[in-house]
Image: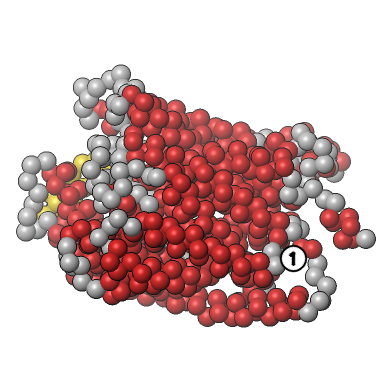
Amino acid sequence: MTQVMRSSVRELTTRGVILGGLITLVFTAANVYLGLKVGLTFATAIPAAVISMSVLRYFRDHTIVENNIVQTIASAAGTLSAIIFVLPGLIMIGWWTGFPYWMTVAVCAIGGILGVMYSIPLRRALVTGSDLPYPEGVAAAEVLKVGDSSGRDPDAVDPNRGGMRAIVLGAVGAAFFSLLGSLKLIASEVAVAFRVGSGATMVGASLSMALIGVGHLVGIGVGIAMLVGLVISFFVILPTRTWDAIPSGDLLDGVNSVFSADVRMVGAGAIAVAAVWTLLTVIGPILRGIVAAAASARKRRSGESVDVTERDIPIQYVGLTIIVALIPIGWLLWDFMKGTALVGSATGILIVTIIFVFVIGLVVAAVCGYMAGLIGSSNSPISGVGVLVVLCAALLIKVTHGPADSTSQTEALIAYTLFTSSVVFGVATISNDNLQDLKTGQLVGATPWKQQVALIIGVLFGSAVIPPILGLMNNAFGFQGAPNATENALAAPQAALLSTLAKGVFGGDLNWALIGLGAAIGAGVIVVDEVLKRTTSNLKLPPLAVGMGMYLPMSLTLIIPIGAFIGLAYDKWALRDPIGGERKKRLGVLLATGLIVGESLYGVVFAGIVAGTGDDSPLAIVGDGLGNWMQVIGVVVFAVMLTAMYSYVKRIGSDDGPAATAVQTKK
């Protein structure tokens, strides 16, 4: 009887799939822009859940599990946008001039589906049979639960009341500030270089509402770690790298060039060591989880009754899908190679890389799934895993092919390495999201196999929308270091790092000394982090966050810690209320999400205007006549708008509403 009643509940519905697809268009576009600009993406599960509940409440018979399917589709597609951490590298090295639509769709779709399949056997071990916290999955489940209960009890206090207003406020405010920057009414970035003894360094910050939102979401621990990395790069390493040759001409340009050429390689070394350490710390639990998952599968095949909330896509279908997916992967790799200088050794390279994708994909899925459960999808070290994937792929392909005989072979090997890595990256990004969503499903009573189908649908939605957005960004701005880059070119920091590593392996000019220095610093940070974990209750220094702080330009990293401190102050205010504190805290999270979405979506729209007009500054109405005053005005407007938005959200949070008043009256 229970099974019949449970099967009649609306879950994987047509309207849910359509709504999830529409949300996908918005959040995927926003994540692509943000990732290309600052190298970070944001988790979309919670805002997607809030939007879903706000829409589906107008339909009859809507359910909590139907809302869960909507956020599952949207979060899968939004997470897949992290593929941009690799693919733009093919533009940067001059191999592609644009993003071939169907080839890019295929890379995203096949890699993403593999990610879903690889992580299914891990669900029992890492979700239902694990004490991993899954912070974002739990948070999304709480949002769904309270939204569902408040909709059915007229006397209940709605903990999500005002959530949509917070998102819209943040989005409109961030978009408006970005518009002021495009109109050249204010400066959108401040920077100044100065000498330090015999060397030089700089201080700069991008006046970005999105980065404030990122800082709020990642938290104070990551914010401080990035600040530590920034100090190491800009106030220790950079001045020493400019001792012998202080940049001539414009000091700021010179300092930036030294940072890009030298200091970033130190950051790359720190990221690589932090990624290796992460892998070593999780390999034991991963192996035990796989063994436990296989044992559970054998029990189900023996005919034991399994509750509907424990039913995955059958393991035989999972295995068959993985094997079948290797066929189009092989075709994609061959299609990429044909007509290049690699044709003579194509067979050997193709066999090796297919095996590499199959094996490393499983490892990456397990690692990323475990890390998402430990620290959340937003903080999971996708970039660090990408460093290892590219280095391993490059070294394996180099050994298989042998020494390059010509420049054309070297260029082809670099491009082929990046293309191979992009498939593995699709596996990594979805695995990073899949188990988080399945944790949400477990907490709200969802059917796992339906969620897994929804994840595949989300992958297909994201795969369809990512290529045109990438093409729009490339045509409007270009990427730093690429032939068509403009002065407003997007940094695409991860893609730049990964392409630099691949070129260094095959060109033999990778500065291993700088990477070694970064590795030593990374090892030191790991030691400090472990000591803090063992001697304090809540202090830590995430090594990957320190590495990112060392690698990214100061204009990007300085604002993120500021956002983290703002988020800390807001949360302390919110939690002073023992009853409504969690709701107030959640409103701050939704405001931060709105800041990211608003600026990111404005960036997409502005990119379309630039592409249509052919002008890098099509909206400018004021020139640079005010000089440094533009920067002062920009800082003041930035601070005032942020203060006003957070103050307004505090007022929303302090408004208990009629439901709460009714409850208090009953008391």
Tell me the residue at 19%/64% (across/down): 507
Asked if residue 180 is positioned above or below residue 132 in the image, the reply reads: above
Give the quarter of the image for residue 612: top left
The answer to whether residue 536 is left or right of residue 575 is left
Q: Position of residue 553 (x, y in %)?
A: 29, 50
- 666 and 125: which one is in front? 125
Tell me the residue at 55%/76% (across/down): 286
Q: Residue furthest right?
A: 1
- 577 and 403: which one is in front? 403
Look at mark 1 in the image and give the residue it sits on.
311
Q: Position of residue 143 (x, y in %)?
A: 68, 49
SS for dot 1: loop
The answer to whether residue 79 is left or right of residue 235 is right
Amino acid type assigned to the residue bearing label 1 in the image: Arg
Tell me the residue at 26%/40% (across/down): 485
Q: Position of residue 207 (x, y in %)?
A: 36, 38
